[in-house]
Image: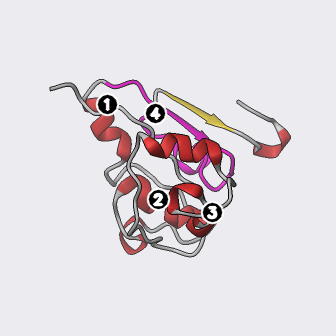
Amino acid sequence: MEPFRGILYVFDSLRPDFMGCYNHDEDSTPEIDRVAQDGIICENAYSQAIWTAPSAASILTGLYPDTHKIYQFNHDLGNSHPFVTDRINNLEIPSAGFSTTLLVSPERGFDRGFDEFYALGGEGEGLR
């Protein structure tokens, strides 16, 4: 059996009630809707925190904030917890991470295990 290959696409602030793939009437998210046609739609997904850093850490580690300890802006993810790339690398699947926020950046340890990681918007540097 061939290993799963896919894209984990995470939005920090996007309401499902305004997306076509979640039955919104207007054509407000046509590209996302096209991707969703061939993907998995999570109808019961809940954020583990009210802001980006701990939420992203929970998505990428599978742990609650009380375990991964990302509470403040200056907290790093570190290497002591499992990470989404652990499994991907064991399956020898190439991986890339992309982020448009400093809250999910190499400086905070979110690039761990990715073959490539692209951070957009760090200190006016643009795409690195």
User: Left of 18 or right of it: where is 10?
Assistant: left
Q: Earlier in the sequence, mark 1 or mark 2?
A: 2
Residue type of the residue flagged with mark 1: Asn
Residue 89 against residue 26 in the figure, above or below: above
- Magenta-highlighted residues: 93-113
Residue type of the residue flagged with mark 2: Ala
Q: Nearer the viewer, residue 8 or 87?
A: 8
Mark 4: secondary structure: loop
Q: Does residue 8 appear in this view?
A: no
- Residue that label 2 marks: 57
Q: CA distance from mark 1 to mark 3?
A: 40 Å
Mark 1: secondary structure: helix
Residue 25 is tagged as: 3
Residue type of the residue flagged with mark 3: Asp
User: Left of 73 or right of it: where is 92?
Assistant: left
Q: CA distance from mark 1 to mark 2?
A: 18 Å
Residue 70 on the magenta segment: no
Residue 115 against residue 62 in the figure, above or below: above
* Furthest residue in direction left, as rendered: 1
Pinpoint residue 49: horizontal percent, then vertical percent: 51, 74
Q: CA distance from mark 3 to mark 2?
A: 33 Å
**Disc nearest the viewer among 1 and 3:** 3
Q: Earlier in the sequence, mark 1 or mark 3?
A: 3
